[in-house]
Image (cartoon, helix red, strand yellow):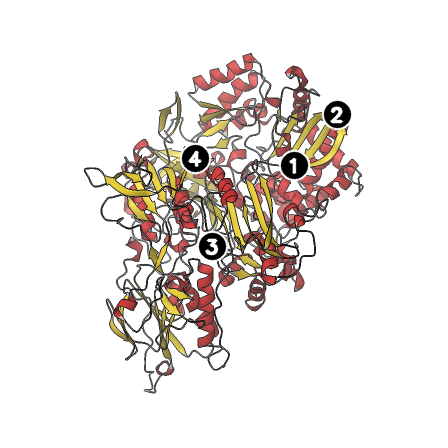
């Protein structure tokens, strides 16, 4: 049992009192008691619906559950590995049950039903009366005959949070390197992903001849298999483990397959299906059990005993048990309706079976099936599309005459799932040729948005939520943002793949109701990034304070005197980017430096442990042997790690912040310039050798790539920019996967724009064909400047073009035809930026004042180890981040409500750390006290001091973080590693759900005669608690002691994975 579920009692709310103070009988005595047996996702859905529909409050609800935790998300079970936070997994917070007077008994299963007396016997509570009994006992994981979980260590099923805890604990054992997943269906592939994410080698065993046999045919399965093999997973089809073998310690060692082969494996995870939990039919003979298991129910979900219902995976409807959550939600709807809004109606709601259509993302591969996937081939006609290069397979099933869509399957590209499922369910005749459903309308650049879909379209397949239901929720609940829509409708709370459509529906409803959709940058500004760019350009704003004065929110999160504004980690980098795109001044100039996020603030990419990487510009990848020798010499002198990047450059990693100016001085002296790998700007222009060497070359791709890279280097944009130039149509430079790319022809160049690789690859669009170098540059100037002016923050060109009404055709009109009459303005603005270029590192290394910005400490020249380095493949790299970290030792004691947690004053003394001139405003600097690093922050109104180590990943980096303030004027620092915010006054973590997990030590600061003093405990106590040598990441931490789920650190904020991706500057 997870430690955070070990409560003094297992009851979440007390039973309603039967009397009131005046002695009269309470209304609760008139209420009927509904007992719900089990508390999974379907039971929770039933409770939610009953509470919503029971307007007269005729029922009180009591729940008995065998599990030690309230309902949690099983559909997204694998997500638990990424955050290890039970609260994030819950369907409703624990307090929700208490707030709604739902009495929950955990660890107290129902073991017997006395239907004559209408009571149940539970393990702990004894006999309890019911008026209505709802069985939602769910299912258990199936195991093959002869296989048990208790014979050998390392054998698991994939079903509950406790299963996941056990799997994680086993994976940390030294001898465990390989996991075997038995079952190639939906759950098996989820388990395979989990095992892979734990760092294990993974093999998948499936008894049938293909993966996902219930959803995919052989061809589709082979595409899926090829995609997951690229991830390093191996599949064995038609062959499964039959006999397990253990070692002398009774731990799994190997197993024999049906084919007779023996495979070595230290872990086996069975995910071969489910078995309905219908044990109560054994102790209650009147409760009829279906032939293939499960409580037999009719269309109203009534069992063979009056007033007893069954829903979810324990119910058998027409001898069919549904293993998906969406049919269970439909069952919950039927029972809740019939007990409330249809209680006195003759026509009851009925369950007519369920559509098993589903859309999922398995091991990073999008997979979907809908309608009738395996029909009678003599009565239907399939239409198939297969792209082995992109890993895409589509097979749609039509009537023989092609007039109706009956079903289909998709691998790799499931964007049209909702539209196709709607067509199947409506059974409407098609208004276009079947080929258009696969290939699209040829020559049409517009994409149908979710707002244009009919109301019966299923948007969320995990929770079976239609567009019409989402629209209803938005109106009835008066939702003001998408998070509220998720909360009330459950759409997007499963795998999350439908969130873009939910967003589109929400925005459509807001527009339809006449409400203005806010695209404001953050709480400090009422304008979007695009609008702020225009304001800054027209009013010639040069500083953050200028933007606050002219565009800040009136009466918002700043004082009446706007000069006291601090900003936040969203608007500061965004305004810094706008200023750079307008005026291209050195980003470390006074007034600009506090706006820069960590990478830009130190002109280098921050890496694990707070070390930095160095990427000199190597235009088009062309570099002389002499310059290569300089890079090698620098790397050897400072013992740095080197690696060739995908952009034809050399990454030099592991540099300390204080060494950066010295390293760059050597590189600048050798003729190198900044490669801007740290900035949202042009990274590189990749090239093949073209006519310089290649026998197929049509043009000088190297020379043109160098010209383009030197032209656009240093220009800041909403997101990073990458270019490419290929010397012929063989496309060795991958120009069509770049933000701008050129492919040589015998007449000049074809110019492509708005492509990108990364997590969401996008093929670039052809902007213009067969143009000269001069024309190509002219059009690129216009294109890039138009993008810089109009794109939202952190938006790549590919995503930007998707939002441009009219798509590439409209962009051509602007760039090629000058449709808006702004071509000259775009070219002039680009020329200004090009003329203002300076190598940022050259400016720094030639200026002693700027170099001091990189000092490790303001009061010491000592050098602390920031992370242990290990040797690997002849180079040094940082020690691995542990999957779990034990809590840091604390100086502080128990905190009283509303008070700052402090060490006893008689143990502390004031320490002088330097003059106020050493601590620039709106920044943090580090002082060294013994072996402890303390971050001192000088905001516009106050001084603060905290430990410099972020407790999340034990990195000594907090002084480098952006300072901000929120709606309550709370000053905070945003950790540069993963954007966790910490209150500067109290040290509290401000990330929802992690308040108790991470906390900073804080220290009082006073200023006397322009000198800064810190009130600190003894040096000895500081060193014992926060000393760098005791707290940094070290090699021995990589296999830590397992801590509870409550105490284990999670990587990222709630719902956002590793940090907040909206802040990935």
Disc 3 target residue: 494
Pointer 3 with pointer 1, Cβ within 8 A: no
> Where on the picture, by quarter, is residue 533?
top right
CA neighbours of label 2 inside 10 A, class few (<14), some (14 to 19), many (20+) = some
Could you say which is closer to the camera, residue 582 or residue 170? 170
| Residue 764, disc | 1
Disc 4 target residue: 232
Give the structural element (helix, strand or loop) at label 1: loop
State whether residue 561 appears in this view: no
CA neighbours of label 1 inside 10 A, class few (<14), some (14 to 19), many (20+) = many
> Looking at the image, is mark 3 or mark 4 earlier in the sequence?
4
State whether residue 895 appears in this view: yes
Disc 2 target residue: 748
Give the structural element (helix, strand or loop) at label 3: loop
| Image location (x, y in percent) of residue 887 | 31, 44
Determine the CA span between mark 4 and mark 1.
29 Å
| Residue 292, disc | none
> Looking at the image, is mark 3 or mark 2 earlier in the sequence?
3
> Where on the picture, by quarter, is residue 740?
top right
- The count of marks equals 4
> Looking at the image, is mark 3 or mark 1 earlier in the sequence?
3
Label 3 or label 4, whichever lies nearer to me, is: 4
CA neighbours of label 3 inside 10 A, class few (<14), some (14 to 19), many (20+) = many
Determine the CA span between mark 2 and mark 1.
18 Å
| Image location (x, y in percent) of residue 179 | 34, 40
């Amino acid at each position: 049992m997870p430690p955070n579920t070990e409560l003094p009692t297992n009851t979440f709310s007390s039973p309603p009192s039967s009397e009131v103070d005046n002695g009269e009988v309470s209304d609760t005595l008139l209420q009927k008691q509904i007992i719900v047996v089990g508390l999974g996702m379907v039971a929770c859905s039933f409770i939610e619906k009953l509470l919503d529909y029971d307007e007269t409050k005729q029922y009180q609800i009591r729940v008995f559950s065998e599990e030690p935790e309230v309902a949690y998300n099983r559909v997204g079970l694998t997500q638990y590995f990424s955050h290890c936070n039970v609260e994030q997994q819950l369907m409703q917070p624990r307090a929700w049950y208490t707030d709604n007077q739902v009495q929950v008994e955990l660890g107290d299963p129902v073991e017997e039903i006395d239907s004559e007396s209408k009571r149940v016997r539970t393990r702990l509570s004894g006999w309890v009366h019911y008026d209505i009994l709802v069985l939602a006992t769910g299912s258990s994981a199936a195991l093959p005959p002869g296989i048990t979980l208790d014979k050998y260590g390392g054998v698991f099923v994939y079903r509950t949070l406790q299963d996941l805890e056990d799997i994680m604990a086993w994976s940390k054992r030294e001898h465990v390197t390989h996991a075997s997943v038995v079952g190639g269906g939906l759950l098996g592939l989820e388990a395979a992903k989990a095992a892979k994410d734990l760092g294990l080698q993974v093999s998948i065993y499936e008894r049938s001849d293909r993966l996902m046999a219930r959803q995919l045919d052989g061809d589709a399965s082979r595409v899926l298999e090829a995609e997951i093999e690229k991830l390093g997973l191996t599949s064995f089809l038609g062959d499964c483990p039959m006999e397990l073998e253990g070692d002398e310690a009774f731990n799994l060692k190997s197993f024999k397959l049906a084919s007779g082969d023996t495979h070595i494996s230290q872990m086996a995870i069975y995910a071969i299906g489910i078995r309905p939990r219908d044990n109560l039919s054994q102790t209650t003979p009147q409760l009829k059990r279906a032939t293939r298991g499960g409580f037999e129910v009719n269309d109203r979900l009534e069992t063979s005993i009056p007033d007893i219902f069954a829903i979810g995976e324990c119910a058998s409807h027409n001898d069919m048990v549904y293993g998906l959550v969406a049919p269970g939600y439909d069952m919950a709807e039927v029972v809740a309706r019939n007990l409330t809004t249809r209680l006195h109606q003759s026509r009851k709601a009925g369950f007519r079976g369920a559509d098993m259509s589903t859309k999922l993302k398995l091991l990073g591969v999008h997979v979907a099936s809908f309608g009738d996937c395996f029909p009678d081939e003599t009565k239907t006609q399939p239409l198939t599309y297969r792209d082995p290069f992109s890993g895409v397979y589509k097979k749609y099933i039509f009537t023989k005459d092609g007039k109706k869509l009956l079903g289909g399957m998709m691998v790799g590209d499931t964007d049209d799932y909702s539209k196709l499922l709607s067509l199947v369910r409506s059974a409407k005749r098609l208004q276009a040729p079947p080929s258009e459903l696969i290939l699209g309308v040829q020559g049409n650049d517009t994409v149908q948005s979710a707002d244009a879909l009919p109301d019966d379209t299923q948007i969320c397949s995990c929770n079976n939520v239609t567009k019409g239901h989402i629209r209803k929720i938005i109106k009835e609940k008066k939702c003001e943002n998408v998070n509220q829509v998720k909360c009330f409708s459950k759409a997007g709370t499963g795998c999350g793949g439908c969130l873009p459509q939910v967003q589109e529906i929400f925005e459509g409803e807001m527009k339809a109701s006449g409400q203005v959709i806010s695209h404001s940058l953050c709480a400090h500004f009422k304008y979007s990034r695009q609008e702020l760019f225009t304001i800054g350009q027209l009013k010639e704003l040069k500083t953050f304070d200028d933007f606050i004065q002219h565009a800040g929110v009136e009466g918002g999160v700043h004082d009446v005197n706007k000069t006291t504004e601090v900003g936040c980690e969203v608007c500061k980098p965004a305004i810094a980017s706008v200023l750079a795109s307008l005026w291209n001044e050195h980003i470390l100039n006074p007034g600009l430096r506090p706006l820069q996020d960590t990478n830009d603030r130190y002109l280098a990419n921050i890496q694990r442990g707070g070390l930095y990487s160095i990427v000199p510009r190597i235009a088009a990848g062309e570099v002389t042997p002499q310059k290569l020798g300089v890079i090698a010499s620098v790397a050897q002198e400072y013992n740095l790690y080197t690696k060739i990047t995908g952009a034809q450059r050399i990454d030099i990693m592991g540099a300390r912040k204080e060494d950066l100016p010295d390293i760059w001085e050597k590189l600048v002296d050798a003729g190198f310039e900044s490669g801007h790998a740290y900035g949202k700007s042009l990274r590189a222009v990749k090239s093949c050798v073209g006519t310089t060497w290649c026998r197929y070359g049509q043009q000088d791709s190297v020379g043109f790539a160098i010209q383009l890279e030197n032209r656009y280097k240093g220009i800041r944009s909403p997101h990073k920019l990458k270019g490419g130039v290929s010397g012929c149509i063989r496309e060795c430079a991958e120009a069509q996967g770049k933000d701008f790319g050129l492919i040589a022809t015998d007449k000049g160049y074809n110019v492509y724009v708005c492509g990108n690789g990364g997590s969401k690859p996008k093929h670039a669009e052809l902007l213009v064909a067969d143009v000269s170098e001069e024309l190509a540059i002219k059009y690129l100037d216009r294109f890039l400047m138009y993008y810089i002016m109009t794109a939202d923050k952190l938006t790549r060109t590919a995503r930007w073009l998707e939002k441009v009404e009219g798509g590439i055709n409209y962009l051509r009109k602007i760039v090629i035809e000058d449709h808006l009459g702004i071509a000259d303005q775009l070219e002039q603005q680009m020329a200004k930026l090009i003329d203002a270029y300076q190598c940022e590192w050259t400016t720094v290394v030639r200026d002693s004042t700027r170099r001091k910005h990189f000092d490790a400490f303001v009061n010491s020249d000592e050098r602390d180890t920031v992370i242990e380095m290990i040797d690997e493949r002849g180079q040094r790299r940082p020690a691995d981040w542990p999957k779990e970290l034990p809590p840091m030792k604390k100086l502080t004691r128990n905190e009283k409500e509303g008070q700052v947690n402090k060490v006893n004053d008689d143990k502390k003394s004031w320490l002088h750390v330097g003059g106020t001139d050493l601590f620039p405003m709106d920044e943090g600097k580090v002082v060294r006290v013994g072996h402890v690093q303390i971050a001192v922050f000088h905001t516009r109104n106050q001084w603060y001091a905290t430990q410099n180590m972020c407790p999340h990943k034990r990195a000594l980096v907090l002084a480098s973080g952006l300072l901000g303030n929120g709606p309550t004027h709370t000053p905070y620092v945003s950790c540069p590693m993963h954007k966790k915010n910490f209150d500067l006054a109290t040290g509290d973590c401000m990330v929802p759900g992690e308040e108790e997990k991470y906390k900073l030590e804080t220290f009082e600061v006073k200023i006397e005669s322009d000198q800064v003093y810190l009130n600190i405990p003894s040096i000895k106590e500081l060193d014992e608690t926060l000393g760098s040598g005791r707290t940094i990441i070290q090699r021995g931490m990589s296999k830590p002691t397992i801590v509870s789920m409550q105490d284990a650190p999670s990587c990222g904020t709630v719902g956002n994975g590793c940090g907040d991706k909206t802040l990935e500057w």
